[in-house]
Image: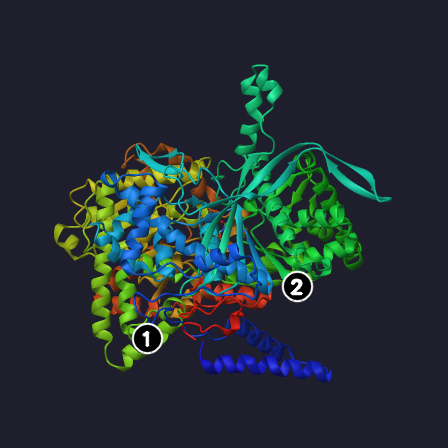
Amino acid sequence: MSESQVIKAEESEKSENSENEEGQIFEKKEEEEEKAKDEKEEKKYTRPALKRRKSLYEGYEEKQEFFRPEYQFNVKDPIKEKMWELMDAYLPRDKLSIQKSIVTHIEYTLARTRFEIDNNYMFQGTALSVRDRLLEQWNDTQMYIRINNPKKVYYLSIEFLLGRLLQNALVNLELEDRYRDALMDFGVKLEEIYESENDPALGNGGLGRLAACYIDSLATLNYPAWGYGIRYEYGIFKQVIENFEQKELPDYWLTKGNPWEIIKLDLQYKVRFYGYCKDEFRNGKKVRVWRGGQEVLAIAHDTAVPGFQTFNCNTLRLWKAYPSEEFNFDEFNRGQHQGALESKDQASYISAVLYPNDSTLSGKELRLKQEYFFSCASIQNIVNRFRRMQLPWSDFPKYNTVQLNDTHPTIALVELLRILIDEYEVEYKDAFDIVLKTFNYTNHTVLPEALEKWGVDIFERLLPRHLELIYLINFYFMEECKKKFHEDWDKIGRLSIIEESFPKQIRMANLCVVASSHVNGVAKIHSGLVKTMLFKDFADMWPNKFTNVTNGVTPRRWVHCEFPELSALLTEYNGGKNEWLAELDLLEEVLDNVKKQGKMDEFIDKFKDAKLKAKLRLKEFVKKNCNLDIDETFMFDIMVKRIHEYKRQFMNCLYCIRRYLDIKKMSPGDREKINKRVTFFGGKAAPGYALAKNVIKLINMVANTVNNDNDVNKYYKVVFLPDYKVSSAQIIIPAADINEQISTAGTEASGTSCMKFVMTGSLIIGTRDGANIEIADSIGEDHIFYFGKTVNEVEKIRKEIANGKRGYVGSRLQECFDAIFNNRFGNTKFMHDYINGLINGGDFYLACHDFYAYMEAQEKVDKAYQDSKSWYQKCVEAICKMGFFSSDRAIQTYANDIWNITPLEVPKPSITKSGHLVSTGDLKHLGD
Ligand code: NBG
């Protein structure tokens, strides 16, 4: 956004305020109102200029000693005085100290000798040595937060798809080069050490990865924040391809231990399940209590989350379930060992496995247990932290704000209500008011099948008191609705938290909307649909509750770590400074300067070289993982994401078939003229999702035919990349020339890989859906290959389909279907029913309706790629205009518009030893 727009937006706010102050009422024409609304929208996307970042260590020598912040504590105890002194400086950052700390951990923590150190041990020693440094910052941050008592933000998410942590930590601590250098002396390459780390894959897809990007940005922007989730033992399954099919293997990601986590045995909470409710008298007052049932313990497993170029270091707190009592000794002594251990096992099941469902709900009791388990522990933790402050409950929302990442942690808001009412005897209305002001909800999908509902029967059994409270919330809410909508029972029925079906269901999304102060979607178009379709009735009632925060991704991982050559190039053209990594908007200035200085050609050439390196890395990856040779001079066309009908991998696969058939028909001379391509697919299908698994099988069978056909494979190849995950995404994404974002318009809430692709220099072929639209707005529509029906057109066609309209197939698509029907790629009978369904009218996701437009767009891609200079220029321009899609901007928007929270920057280390009794303000701070 330009400066003038920013000023305009500020002015509009001023004038709004003065209007209010003077109490004048203006009758605005509709047009003017529209304009004012637009301006307000604009303002939402304006963030205050951040303080320009720079390295914390700029201008200091390698051996410089840095001291830790001091607080005004009275240290009289001479023993403590000694300890205090010993702990007052940070670990030195010079090479020898780094080396010593690594080998010390290898010998004294890991108990390995000098003679048997492999890469794995080298990784662990290195990680532990990095963790020591994280802990210093972490302790200082937590201390500083305690002393200053700011408002805190809690991000509750059932998934955190972190990916590997070592490089991220080193980059954020500004230690990557020093560790590289230090390890070099041991004859070890840092990049090889990175490879030894297991991916903590505690998430399915975009939702979990978003949570991981957000905690990175929260720390980078110095917000006092906690991520809360579950410490699963098994992450998302490992995918292998056998006989063209997906096979799932368990992902026990802890085989090498987890050097990052700190188990806080003293931080444990009891979580109750089942049991019954009854009235009791407490100090003469009637109270409702929840008794009996089963108890498990939730124990905190913490991971430090460092920010980039800051000393702030936050906490990701994952809860692991343990039995609440040791096993039954009586039973054990009677020789019934198995029975005695049973309850122990049962408790640990709760946090054992991540549910592998993506977008579709598996209605298992264990899943609801997981949801309550981590919500309950997190709320207890938050409440305890607040109680230390000894403030009235009404102050709770002033100090705490909770973001619900989708509906999975919804029960947390009921838990807070329960604690306030049942344990602290707060009146219902006051308690609900506290809950309402504390909670906010992010919706991540409009697909009806993905909206969580729980049978009242399960709830009644598992969480009887919560069910009572949900009924109570709904009772008051229904009263409000009746006042507003009188006899409009349809509407009231739609609004109700309880769905009057058989069996009755609790609509978790409705509960979220009723009990949260803000509800946001994750891209403009999606937030629009949330307001006008999904929660229309609610939006009529509370229009101001609904807002948009377009997703973002962290450029630290998704540009710098995954594409070092590009990162170096951007830093070079930014005058040697990497501050753009914390302020991605800066790249726009970099681009302007490059253009002004007439260096565009040089910049493009260097980018091209960098892209080639990324493509070579993917080539090597394909050789290793698929035993297939690909040519890096081909155009790389990549589609990686969970396999789902709405994402339309099938339509892409049909296009692969079309391309194959076309090349096959050509003369050898004509073949030489075509744009050479490799189409890559990657992604997992939920184990119970038969269609998605069949699509994977079809892709692999088509790939097998194409790649083994000597008429074709010199010009075209198809690759299925197995076991798509964060670490492989970091190899795959930067290698793309073109990336596929081809969901049916209105179905992909946002998508985040599109952002990662464009940030690393590839162009989108895609529909007007999710974040594609805003990306096109930022980088220019001539930088994207748009195609396909728009949301409104999709709606219209769906209505026609419902009224019996048949889809248009046409000969070019029919030939593709025929190839499948005729077993051109082997026995593909498993797809016949599905295809027949599409042809006979059930094309709900418009794979056929959009196919011809898709084909045309692909032709445009081929043509554009031939003009290599203009292609790469577009890529470079697009990279530099992606500032808006940094997760830093997204978090800033949440902070301003939803959380109402300000940063708290931890004091930077001092270069002088300042004595004990100084306030933090007196310190001479680095970088100030
Ligand atoms: C997913 C959407 C994506 C979106 C991510 C993150 C769920 C339920 N939703 O489009 O499908 O990018 O959330 O917001 O996983």
- For mark 1, does the 10 Å Cα neighbourhood hold few (<14), some (14 to 19), or many (20 or more) residues? some
Question: Please, which residue is most extreme toward the front here?
Answer: 78
- Its colouring scheme is rainbow
Task: Nearest to the eye among marks 1 and 2: give it.
Answer: 2
In the image, 60 versus 348, the foreground residue is 60
In the image, 696 versus 470, the foreground residue is 470
Q: Which residue is mark 2?
A: 398
Residue 290: image x %, image y %?
A: 73, 38
For mark 2, give the secondary structure.
helix
- 3D distance between C-alphas at marks 1 and 2: 40 Å
Indicate the quadrant containing the N terminus: top left, top right, bottom left or bottom right: bottom left
Indicate the quadrant containing the C terminus: top left, top right, bottom left or bottom right: bottom left
> From what the image shows, is residue 460 above or below residue 47?
above
Q: Are marks 1 and 2 in contact (CB under 8 Å)?
A: no
Q: Which residue is mark 1?
A: 590
Is residue 565 toward the left or the right of residue 165 in the image?
left
Callout 2 amino acid:
Lys
Residue 549: image x %, image y %?
A: 53, 63
Q: Which picture quadrant has residue 568?
A: bottom left
> From what the image shows, is residue 327 above or below residue 759?
above
For mark 1, give the secondary structure.
helix
Q: Residue at x 40, y 43 (%)?
A: 258
> From what the image shows, is residue 121 above or below residue 334?
below
Callout 1 amino acid:
Val
Is residue 916 in view from this perspective?
yes
Question: Please, which residue is most extreme toward the top here?
Answer: 334
- For mark 2, does the 10 Å Cα neighbourhood hold few (<14), some (14 to 19), or many (20 or more) residues? some
Residue 719: image x %, image y %?
A: 27, 45
Residue 173: image x %, image y %?
A: 38, 60
In the image, 640 versus 224, the foreground residue is 224
